[in-house]
Amino acid sequence: MTDARHAELQRRYFEAADPERFRWTTEAQGFAETEDALLADVLARVVEPCLEIGCGEGNNLVRLLRQGRCFGVDLFPQKLHFAAANLPGARLAVADAAALPFRDGAFRSVFVRDLLHHVPRPPAVLAEAVRLLAPGGALLLLEPNGRNPLVRLQTWLVPAERGARASGAASLAALLEPLPLEDVELRMLEPLPLRRLFLHYRFGMPSLGRVAVARRGIAAAERLLGRVLPASRWSYVAIRARKR
């Protein structure tokens, strides 16, 4: 696929703000706490000033702002208009992830989530992220693993997510290898996050999240499946590294 076709596919799917998704990830009982747990390690390592590249409606910024000053950039203005209305403490800018309007070394933490498989040139985005880090600053990545069954299913159901099929621990490590980083740590998270399927705000039954027995049942199933699924096939790749 050409860069132009790739960009148009992403624009059609992502340019509009999605308030329902924002509320699901930040407020929905049974699911919002899943996001809290997924981001706990990131939040523990964020030092202000921080930047999120590809912040969308602000689903992650809600949590990042609790750690201090945080900026967010996104390509789509409608998403940032929504974020500005709902996150008055955030500093926001419309920008291309591969050409960001900040000086070298402006941030002590940079967070990138679920973005690299959506952009035509991931190395350029990562190079920008590292450029913006001060020496010793933390690069924090969270990306899907295309080997996970649920991630794979999503790539078939949503054309804009097809890039995730090539996403994984090895491909992400290869992207980081040429960059001036050290202390690179990689972990696999969320073996089979059934809550993302069963409680999905569009395709599932999010009301089940308000039923205690349903929450416990889904969590038990996730734990059981997590024992049998190899870590190499868990759903998220989390990487943290320090700029030299």
Image (cartoon, rainbow, N blue to C red):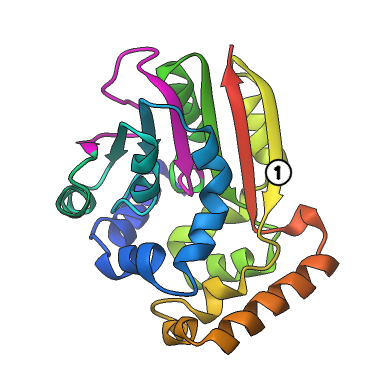
Q: x, y percentage for residue 102?
A: 29, 19
Q: Is residue 97 magenta?
A: yes
Q: Is residue 126 magenta?
A: no
Specify the amino acid type for callout 1. Arg
Question: Which quadrant of the structure image shows residue 178?
Answer: top right
Q: Which residue is at a point 25% across and 55% down the rendered structure image? A: 15
Q: x, y percentage for residue 151?
A: 60, 64
Image check: 18 left or right of 66? left
Provide the residue designation for mark 1.
Answer: 187
Q: Name the residue nearer the viewer: 174 or 35.
A: 35
Q: So how many labels did they put on this image?
A: 1
Q: Which residues are magenta?
A: 91-116
Question: Which quadrant of the structure image shows residue 233?
Answer: bottom right
State whether residue 170 is above or below residue 12: above
Can residue 98 be seen here? The reply is no
Q: x, y percentage for residue 209?
A: 48, 81
